[in-house]
Amino acid sequence: MLVAASLVGFFALRAAVPKSAPDRATAVDAELAAAARLPESPAPAFKPGKPRLLDRSEKVYRWAPVLRAAEARTAPSGTARVVATLNTRTPEGTTNIVLVVGARHADGTLWLRVRLAVLPNNTTGWVRRSALGGYHFVHTRLVVNLARFEAKLFYDGRVIFRAPVGVGQSRSPTPTGFFYVREELTRFANAFYGPIAFGTSARSSVLTDWPSGGFVGIHGTNEPDLIPGRVSHGCIRLRNRDIVQLSRLMPIGTPVTVR
């Protein structure tokens, strides 16, 4: 029994002895030979492209729908003075939207600074974020030059559309400032507005007794020969073919600059 135990201990000790350098080299060669017989790796399903710098010319603007009636205030605070009440629908019955131009946390609440469709024009106010829906983003901006009777649509700072326009007469001028497209309307019973009209947040400071308060629209016309010129009560008129083309390029929420 003692001899058997000694033999077992001897073989265990021998097994624990590490391989010599020649033995290790032989094992490595065998593993390399086996690896050489393996099939090649399949082609990658995705190949990363060459890195490129971000386009600094990108211009993104955001808007949000009004989910519930809310008060817009002069500052991001529930005690600040109310400058306007936001309704969920426009006077034409479409979803009311606001252009977002700033944000701030105050007293644990996120407030958004938005452009308001009220007089005086260019008024902004602070609204609780919870009163608005999800953000929508646009890359377009419309610029109307009253002196040149011209409208240009920009996409990321690049002109993609231009057309002559009719603007307000001297007794009912088109208001200048920074606005946005609130809605798109079609199927008018009166050909005066052409096939399409965009409602904006701009309002006439003269024709305040008009229906809904004299909002300024961008629309077609049944008198194309009057364009370009000072021909309207404040709205911006385009020839019908131009307003149709513009409708394909300009989404709701697009900022509008009138100068």
Image: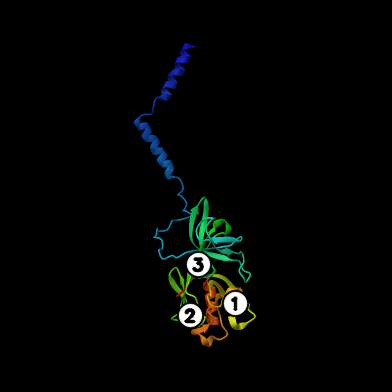
Looking at this view, is 74 or 181 the one in front?
A: 74
- Circles 1 and 2 in contact, beta carbons < 8 Å: no
Residue density around tag 2, few if under 14, some if 14–19, many if 20 or more, within 10 Å: some
Q: Going 43% across and 71% down the picture, which residue do you hit? A: 158
x and y percentages locating residue 79 in the rendered image: 54, 56
Looking at this view, is 185 or 70 the one in front?
A: 70
User: Residue 210's mark?
Assistant: 1
Of the image marks 2 and 3, the number of the one nearer the N terminus:
3
Which of labels 2 and 3 is toward the front? 3
Which of labels 1 and 2 is toward the front? 1
Of the image marks 1 and 2, the number of the one nearer the N terminus:
2
Residue density around tag 3, few if under 14, some if 14–19, many if 20 or more, within 10 Å: some
Q: Going 53% across and 60% down the picture, which residue do you hit? A: 81
Write down the quadrant of residue 34 in the picture.
Answer: top left
* Residue labelled with disc 3: 123
x and y percentages locating residue 239 in the rendered image: 53, 82
Of the image marks 1 and 3, the number of the one nearer the N terminus:
3
* Residue labelled with disc 2: 163
19 displayed left or right of 196: left
